Image: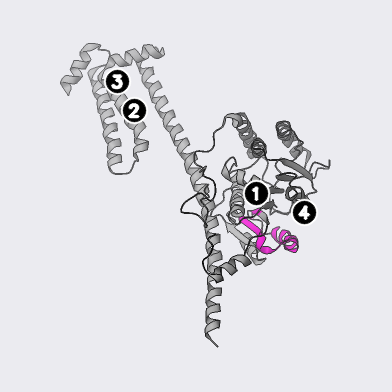
Amino acid sequence: MFALIQAAGEVGDVIPPRQRLVAILVSILILLGVLELVRQRKLREEYSALWVLTALGLLVLALNYRILVWLTHLIGAALPTSTLFFGGLIFLMLLALQFSVRLSRLTYRSRSLTRRVALLEEELRELKRRIPDEEDMLEDDGRP
Amino acid sequence: MPSGTSPAKLDSELSTKPSRVLILIPAMNEEQSLPEVFEALVKQFPPKDILLVDDGSSDRTPEIAASYGCKVVSHIHNLGYGSTLLTGYHYALLHDYDYVVQVDGDGQHPPALIPRLLQPVIQGDCDVAIGSRYLEGKSPTGWLRRLGALPLSLVASLWIGSKITDPTSGFQALSKKAILELCTDGFPDDYPDIDVLIHLHRKDIRIREIPVVMKPRVHGQTMHGGWKALYYYYRMAVCLLLMPIRRNSPYRRQRPMDDHPLDKGSLRGLYS
């Protein structure tokens, strides 16, 4: 592991190795944490995708500094750090948007369920109201 | 309904055969004004054709309706005016009603004028008849309210091509064609406004306003005003701008009624 970090560091050394090590560890921790939550069924696969993608992206950037520099040039940022912050911001926004979409769906579903439950309850009440009538009729027929 | 089961069942089906007009009363915590509404309604219509949709009331609203022998459907929690109407529309379709008349539970809509609303719909002159407070000039509501509603009614009138003066009026008579369209898609489940009218117009459903006189609200609070008014303006703007390019809701089933293999006869494959 350390050899890998050093090897990567030789290419374009701007970040100190200690910082790189922290970045790598953090991204691996996020990745493992998310996968563990999925394993425990506390997180659904559909919500884990964005997290896994972000952790992987962070890992790649931490391992290979050149990609970060290339990205920085691509988006026209002045510093590699602002590229990282920008990326983080985009990630959070995407996550929030995903939640809004899911919330809209949940709202829709809970509303239609409430309406349907109300209709079913009424139908059930009506059916129950009719059953004792029929029983009374049967008893009346049996008596004479 | 499945036929050819038992004679007793057939009989009970015949005796409970739905009539053609359903009176739909959306209500949330209206126990003070409901008795008056029901007193007037039961004189004109059989109680079994009067449906109160209770939108999660915490007071005696559903009990009052039941005490008049009317049908009651209760939401387990508050969903808002639009959803309450939608529940009523679904009820109407499930029970094969041909027409629905909406009367608000707050006592503003005079039940005596129901025939005036129903007449053009039953005669086939239009599919939706809206009782308008403003058509005859007199306005029982404040001028501020009137001014706030003016841009919306202008947009609606221009889009639909006929005069719409009171687009948010809840006093309406609807034909089955209109109800089917509203249950399929396009009905907002928070608060219906001119977007519904324009949507219906786009689906070739004929809308007409009928002049009515409404009573001022005695009990309870109005649903309009404050920040909500601002939000409605925003929602209208988004709805109207997106209207021509908007997709149908991905969550609503597009399957027509009576087409669900398992649900025939019960809820008839009616979702949403």
x%, y% of residue B263?
Answer: 49, 54
A26 over B58 or under it: above or below: above
Same chain assignment for discs 2 and 3? yes
Asked if the stretch drawn in magenta spans residue B44, the answer is yes
B222 over A132 or under it: above or below: above
Same chain assignment for discs 3 and 1? no
x%, y% of residue B120?
Answer: 76, 47
Nearer to me, B1 or B109: B1
Question: What range is drawn magenta here?
Answer: B25-53
Residue marked by disc 3: A61
Of circles 4 and 2, which is in front?
A: 4
First in sequence: mark 1 vs mark 4: 4
On residue B115, the disc is 4
| Disc 1 from disc 4: Cα separation | 17 Å
Residue name at image x 54 percent, y 74 percent: A134
Residue name at image x 41 percent, y 29 percent: A92
Q: Residues within 10 Å of mark 3 (few under 14, many from 20)?
A: many
Q: Amino acid at mark 3?
A: Leu
Asked if the stretch drawn in magenta spans residue A41, the answer is no
Of circles 1 and 4, which is in front?
A: 1
